Image (cartoon, grey):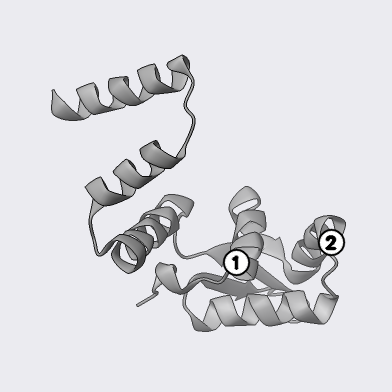
Amino acid sequence: MADASKISNSEWEVMKCIWGNPTCTANEIVDALSKRTDWKANTIRTLINRLVKKEVLGYNIDKKDKKTYYYFPLLSENECIKAESESFINRVFNGSLNGMIANFLNESKLSDEEIKELKNILDKKKG
């Protein structure tokens, strides 16, 4: 079973490419990431292989040429965000969501609009 909370920052970048294009080749991933990072193709292919081993990515092999691999996410972006969020709260705030929210609210400057939005979220959760 995949552990989405174990995805590294670099692997997140690969996943963002794949969530944006759910059936893509390694070359397409390399092209996309080469435009916004200074990573070499071999580095990106290593990240892809790690994600396959972690069971976050799956692949199909082209039936005609048997050389092209098409990668697809085995976990949705929301599943990964949820797992990462839970891991972060557990690691940093000992599992306390209230502690995390209080810390962020105390340390952040919020506009009136942002405060209103947060109140609306809490009201929806409450009611």
Give neighbour class at mark 2: few <14, some 14-19, many 20+ (Cα, 10 Å).
few
Q: Is residue 60 above or below residue 103?
A: below
Q: Is residue 43 above or below residue 120?
A: below
Q: In the figure, residue 80 lies in which quadrant?
A: bottom left
Helix, strand or loop at mark 1: helix
- Near-viewer residue (67 or 40): 40
Q: Position of residue 11 (x, y in %)?
A: 61, 69
Query: Residue shown at 48%/53% (left/top)?
Result: 77
Instruction: Quadrant for the C terminus, please.
Output: top left
Q: Position of residue 99 (x, y in %)?
A: 26, 50
Q: Position of residue 108 (x, y in %)?
A: 47, 36
Which residue, given by chain and number where applicable, does mark 1 sit on?
Answer: 9
Q: Position of residue 82 (x, y in %)?
A: 36, 54
Give neighbour class at mark 1: few <14, some 14-19, many 20+ (Cα, 10 Å).
few
Q: In the figure, residue 4 lies in which quadrant?
A: bottom left
Q: Residue furthest front?
A: 106
Badge nearest the viewer, 1 or 2: 1
- Near-viewer residue (36 or 68): 36
Q: CA distance from mark 1 to mark 2?
A: 19 Å
Q: Is residue 8 above or below residue 111?
A: below
Q: What amino acid does circle 1 point to?
A: Asn
Q: What amino acid does circle 2 point to?
A: Asp
Query: Residue shown at 57%/63% (left/top)?
Result: 72
Are circles 1 and 2 on residues that touch, CB within 8 Å? no
Which residue, given by chain and number where applicable, does mark 2 sit on?
Answer: 31
Q: In the figure, residue 120 lies in which quadrant?
A: top left
Query: Residue shown at 60%/66% (left/top)?
Result: 9
